[in-house]
Amino acid sequence: MKISVIIPVYNAEKFVSQAIESALQFDEVYEVILIEDKSPDNALQVCQLFSEKHERVKLYQHPDKGNHGASSSRNLGIEKSTGDFLAFLDADDYFLPNRFEAEKELFKNPEVEGVYGALGVHYYSEKGKEQYYHLFEDGLTTVYKKHPPKDVFFGQMHMLGSFGLFTIDALTIRKSSLIKKMNILFKDHLILHEDTEFLFRLSYYLDLYPGSIDKAVAVRGVHEHNRITKVDTHEVDPAISRSLLWKEVYSWAQQEDTIPDDAKTHIKRMLRSYEIAKAPPLKKWGMVIKYLITDYRSIRSGLYNINFKYSLIS
């Protein structure tokens, strides 16, 4: 296996060394691609030291050396990658020694286009734990049981009951499949939940298989400066950010003729649910009454979403 690990780097001076070293521990990792996104701290200097010391570490910036966000940085990493497989890692997270054990076996089957696993959690500070323990606790972010590839999209859409979640830190993709079947990248204009939206489309177009889902293969590093701080402190309203996500998914689904009608209906109902949640009080109740009359499940689908408490994660 020749794996390209893509790490977008922004304001991660304290953490990126651990992320890089956790990727370099594997012989299967052909290259570690760092996309430095105009960090306000000294992350660029840290990345430069690693690229000078390790031949496998390759450092890039955007052509204008500006800040373009996680989506654009991951897209640039995909463009620069030369490995046969792609793995992603946030700069404040890290891989565990078993990260690619299941992948090495599963990818021997050419029908396997992607493998996902479980993600653990580590709190870098007491303040970070105080802020986010109610979201992550000490458990795994994982899919609760093994599903065939055809069910993964519907599970990600919250249409299979208690499905669970996987994240891009625990995902490995066959690059040729990504280019041939999808030829799509992360949406640059999504500031939050861009990885969730990407996984929705990925699970529709590619055959994704479970790897290690009962034991973490990577770790989410939680601290008070995580991007989700903006949501958690209500600098960004979570209902607004989620409605933007589902609006994007709805727009994509309407253009994709092969998506089943029941899935399109579900996506529309999820969008309506979050639009209700973000609306001002008077308008909110008007929308509730409207949908109670025309489509009760438009309201119920969002309020009873079993993964709602995770809506601030990505």
Image (cartoon, grey):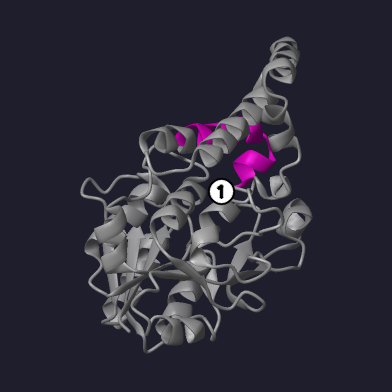
| Above or below, 245 relative to 222 | above
Q: Is residue 260 left or right of residue 181?
A: right
Q: Position of residue 289 (x, y in %)?
A: 75, 14
Q: Residue 224 or 149: which is nearer the viewer?
A: 149
Q: Hey, which residue is sitting farthest bottom in the picture?
A: 27
Q: Is residue 53 left or right of residue 243?
A: left
Res 89 seen here: yes
Q: Position of residue 236 (x, y in %)?
A: 60, 33
Q: Residue 117 or 150: which is nearer the viewer?
A: 150
Which quadrant does the N terminus fall into?
bottom left
Q: Which residue is mark 1?
A: 227
Res 235 seen here: no
Magenta part of the chain: 228-248
Q: Position of residue 248 (x, y in %)?
A: 46, 35
Q: Residue at x 36, y 42 (%)?
A: 188
Three-letter residue code for mark 1: Arg
| Above or below, 189 relative to 164 | above
Q: Residues within 10 Å of mark 1 (few under 14, many from 20)?
A: some
